Image (spheres, coloured by chain):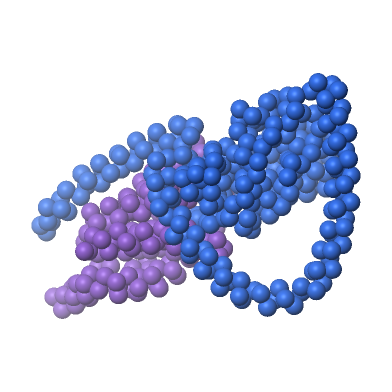
Chain colours: A blue, B purple
Amino acid sequence: MSANPAQRKAPWILAALLLFQVVLMSTNARHPDSEQSFLRVWLVTVFAPIVHAGNSVLSSVKGVASSYVDVRHAREENLELRERVDELTAERNKALERATQLDSIRTQLALPPHPPYRELAANVISRDATLWFRRLTIDRGTLDEVKRDMPVSAGGGIVGRIISVGPNFAMVQVITDKHAGVGAMLQNSRAMGEVRGIDNDRCELKNISTSENVEVGEAVVTTGLDRIYPKGLLIGTVERVEVDPNAPWHKIIIKPAAPVDRVEHLLVLLVEQKDLKLNEGIEVRNPPR
Amino acid sequence: MQTFKIALTIVVALLLQMLLSDYVGFFQYIDLPLLVTVYFGLQRAPVLGMVTGMLAGLGGDAIAGGIVGVGGFSKTLIGYLVGTASVRLSLENPLARLAVVAVASAANTVLFVGLYQMLEQALPHMSTWAEFGATIGWKVLGDSVTSIALFVVLDRVFSEQATARRMAIRKRFYE
């Protein structure tokens, strides 16, 4: 059987293309900023407006379909929300009072002030394009002063951090991603560990000694020691504690406070590593709004 | 014109992959860039298959996150293998195409995961062999079912290739 010239050259072309990609992936794998690749920035910058437009169309179609269901439950939901607003207003007033007292004490003790930072609202335009990575693409980028390693939050808890950014988009690594890690501590005992993503929509708090008393429902907050997330942001609550008498560490499963698997709108905290000092603060509180 | 249509097909596949994963949960198990690679590989053109595989794979890496080049490597190889197989074997009928998609889907997952293991990077859904097997099974199912509809659409878009393929079937049958 006689093959045409293109077919005869095919193995050589294959070898060249594979070699090129071996070099590409080896370089990327070794590089600490591998997520910020030129190809990714270039391609997603072009795709982002199209996906955003497509998202708007699909969202409106989905919105029309679900609006009837929403309207049916609106009355009950309205009553529930009114009660919740009352509760939250009372909590906020208490928190403001405590914050004022704390600021006063900090001034008296000459402690450094908290780093000021702004929040920027963003929309999710794409989510988990494949099975392997938990990533969100948002419609804010360097043109909106978004930079790599900026934290992202929603619904009162952190969602993740920016790992790749272009002019009109940013890619967020969600805290439930297997590669994600957050410096964390238990809010009551102040025991410090590290939150890592696990395969499902949960995280695991690691390196907490079995000598520590951990309660289900206890809040887990950021330590600020990873120099990415400011201290005191809510990560989630302890969902369950698996005790192994032979293990030196607890196995603590965390339910994220933010709805990371269905978040549509989120806030980028415009805070950079240089703004986060290790002695950032002593108390835990939510970021200023 | 043909080159432009192929490039546009890859771009549309990548855009749909980015867009629909947010709305259809099972879409994560479907790999449109892979299906496009297999389709062009089945045109009895190994070079077209591997070039399409490389472009679709690198594009997929770019939109999904992770290390750029891993998906490109696996899809380039699969594009070449499917192209070479389609030159030597009769893979023109729909059932054979379905079988090729199933094998390509499984091979792509194994290659992708294997390359990440070699680069010492952890991936989810890999805790046990059973979980890995289930992931492959779901991906094979997702890709195979989607390919039935997608290949019909692509046959209409690339009607000249579809006609040539039908001619090849007749030629093999009568000679």
Q: Tell which of B132 and A175 is nearer to you.
A: A175
Q: Which residue is drawn at 16% across and 75% down?
A: B171
Q: Tell which of A163 and B121 is nearer to you.
A: A163
Q: Tell which of A158 and A202 is nearer to you.
A: A158
Q: Residue at x 53, y 49 (%)?
A: A140
Rendered image quadrant of residue B97:
bottom left
Locate residue B162 relative to residue A41 in the image: left or right. left
Q: Where residue A177 sits: x, y (%)?
A: 60, 46
Of all residues shown, which one is farthest toward the left? A2
- B135 above or below B150? above
Residue A65 visible to the viewer: yes
Q: Where residue B20 sits: x, y (%)?
A: 50, 63
> Quadrant of the image for the C terminus of chain A?
top right
> Quadrant of the image for the N terminus of chain A?
bottom left
Residue B132 visible to the viewer: no
Of all residues shown, which one is farthest toward the top? A110
- B159 above or below B21? below
- B158 above or below B13? below
How many numbered discs? 0
Rendered image quadrant of residue B84:
bottom left
Q: Which residue is drawn at 46% across and 37% down?
A: A34
Q: Where residue B48 sits: x, y (%)?
A: 24, 56
Q: Which residue is drawn at 69% across and 39% down?
A: A195
Q: Where residue B61 sits: x, y (%)?
A: 43, 48
